[in-house]
Image (cartoon, helix red, strand yellow):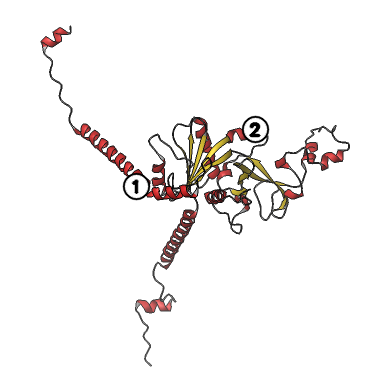
Amino acid sequence: MARHRRGKSKSARLARLGQLGILKGGKEILEKQNKAVKKQQILVAKEAIEKEQAKLPHSFVIYNGSVGKYIRMLMMDIRKVLEPNTASQLKIQKRNNVKDFIVNGAVLGLSHMIVLTKSDTSVNMRLLKTPQGPTLQFKVNSYTLFRDVIASSKRPVVYEKLMSSSPLLIMNGFAGSDKKELKLVESVLQNLFPELKPEKVLLRNVRRCVLFNYDEESDTISMRHYAIKAVPNDISKSTKKILKDKVPDLSKYKDISEFFLNPGHLSESEFEGEQNEVELAEDLPGKGCLKGMKSNVRMIEIGPRLDLTLTKILEGIDEGEVLYNRYVTKTAEDVKKLRSLAPLLKSRRKKRERIVNVRIVRRLKNLQKAKSQPEPEPEPFHEEELENFV
């Protein structure tokens, strides 16, 4: 009987070993493929984050002209309010103007710009919506710096990650007014801060809130900046004083129960009552702030403070039709005349700008020519001339 001849080829040997179809170095190839897939996933995630960041509002806060050190400090404080979506380390030089920041900021996705100026009589603030406007002009009636608010607070709340997430925006008093200019101001202020979606935002990231309040009697807008703090609702403030061996002044109370039940001796931000108690939906940083527990929500002011009066609204960026003027009222006929003259005035303004640019370019060329020309060699001195100066 003829004996069956076994295959001696490479594929036959691999088939007997059960390794047919497995490439040499298969593990290394799989590892490379996994690394390539992970890199691709990281790139896709980065692109998604960049797209989301591009949709967020980005702002510049600058000053223009000679303003003094306190306005420069106010500028830095406003940058803190708008963090992290603002250029907090933006440097300003004397030769820079507003147009330079608008042109260079377009590459960075600039959406808003705040410009602080100072005159002999008042401090002014302009809020510009780029790239097409409008421009809101305010008079700063009064302001308080971040450091002054913190210095006056008994228990200031300042830590490293406080400004790392966007603040919660609260608008009060704007909805009830029928003034068209206030609706425009409300829209611009809302777009100045990123939108917070309740289904996506984490409670631990909501650390601050900004309040804009409109007072109809005085026709002013006030801005306040608060830190949000959750405190476990286990022991009242009154009980803590007793536990710390601090004997309170009970002369104002008829019974000691009034001291424990009456929260009147606490400040407004530290009021302890049912209206401030919330049940936490997730764990928060801090002692006793766990999911499902009841906590007191407190708002501690951290500054800065601003009291503003709206003076003017322009259609464009520092130019265009005047949509609102606090001090000047115009009839419908005056508005028609101004609108008919607007194209002529715009062309004249552009012509003046071109003339100025041509003069600047011509001056720079003359300076370059003067630098490129060699300096004339000094004439040699004669001995007779030197003797005259001896």
Query: Taking 293 as reference, is 87 left or right?
Result: left
Count of numbered circles in the view: 2
Q: Secondary structure at mark 2?
A: helix
Q: Quadrant of the N terminus?
A: bottom left
Q: Can residue 212 be seen in the rendering of this structure?
A: yes
**Tag 2: amino acid:** Ser
Q: Is residue 75 above or below residue 105?
A: above
Q: Which residue is mark 1?
A: 347
Q: Which residue is mark 2?
A: 152
Q: Nearer the viewer, residue 130 or 301?
A: 130
Q: Quadrant of the C terminus?
A: top left
* Residue in the picture at 75% in, 47% down: 233
Q: Residues within 10 Å of mark 2 (few under 14, many from 20)?
A: few
Please state the horizontal and vertical placement of residue 200, each as a whole percent of the image: 59, 58
Q: Is residue 27 above or below residue 183?
A: below
Q: Can residue 133 be seen in the rendering of this structure?
A: no
For the view shown, which residue lies furthest in the front direction?
333
